[in-house]
Amino acid sequence: MIYTIGFVLLILVLMVVYAFNHRDNPRIFLYHNVSDKEVSYKTNMSSAKFERQIAMLKKLNFEFYTIEDLFDDKEIQKHNRRAFITFDDGFEDIYTNVFPILKKYNVKATVYACRSIAGKKVLSDEQMKTMQDSGLVEFGSHSTNHINMLEYSDDIVNDDIVKSKSTIESITGAPCTSFAYPYGKFTDAHVEMLEKAGYKTAVIIGKKLKSYQELESDKYRIPRIEPRGNMNIFQFIVLILFGKYKI
Ligand SMILES: [Zn+2]
């Protein structure tokens, strides 16, 4: 019995030490769908739940930035509680369900957009432009058609990396400087292509909380933590503290 209590106490102490040591690290969140039509599950979240999570981050005094600010704005690195909200895929529900919440709470976000995904409705050019012009949203690339880059030749992948950047820039009128690997799959050669094409950063899933220094030493493998549609608000707080919550 005494050993069990000792073990539990040790775990608790280690958790507190971990949370304390990582308190200044930026929280980079990965979302996908925010839709009330699909059931609450894994990568889809209801708009009410998404709003509760944003409200909770606000209550905890988090400030919100886009991925471009990560390294470009050294001032924000001096403060703790910085949140970076990101969305992969660029589904239309980002405009219909997420954008109103971003405006309501004055929250910035980064959307990694594809221009088409089989069987899914993605953001229109006009919707992207409106979001960009609001000053709240930065757009990155998630490839043109959500390709698994491991299944294509380097030439085809390189063309896509270059083309998807210029397509997004022509739609938004703003620089597209960040990339999210579709399915999280990539090689070192792809990283070099991104750098050559003018991308400054790339994001992965990762589920880790890294410091600015760690992130800056590996800008093309920036890990993100992942709130899930079936997470309650307490589990979300655990995710903020530790970067992980197994569900
Ligand atoms: Zn994706």
Image (cartoon, rainbow, N blue to C red):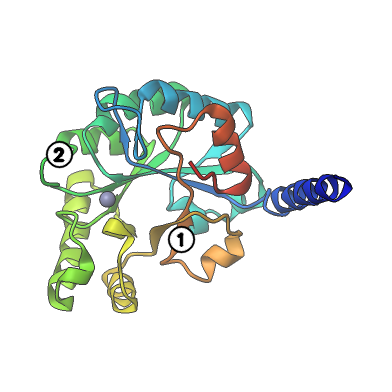
Q: Earlier in the sequence, mark 2 or mark 1?
A: 2
Q: Position of 247 compared to 210: left or right?
A: left
In the rendered image, residue 174, in percent from the top left (x then y), is placed at 28, 49
Camera-near label (2 vs 1) is 2
In front of the other: 110 or 118: 118
Identify the amino acid type marked 2: Lys
Q: Secondary structure at mark 1?
A: strand
Identify the amino acid type marked 1: Ile
In this view, 76 is above or below 199: above
In the rendered image, residue 108, in percent from the top left (x then y), is placed at 43, 37
Q: What is the quadrant of the N terminus in the image? A: top right
Q: Position of 107 compared to 74: left or right?
A: left
Which residue carries the number 1 mark? Answer: 222
Identified at 72% across, 54% down, the residue is 21
Q: Which mark is residue 115?
A: none
In this view, 50 is above or below 145: above
| Residue 126, image quadrant | top left
Identified at 26% across, 54% down, the residue is 142
Badge 2 residue CB within 8 Å of ligand 1: no
In the rendered image, residue 121, in percent from the top left (x then y), is placed at 15, 36
In the rendered image, residue 26, in percent from the top left (x then y), is placed at 57, 50
Q: Which mark is residue 120?
A: 2
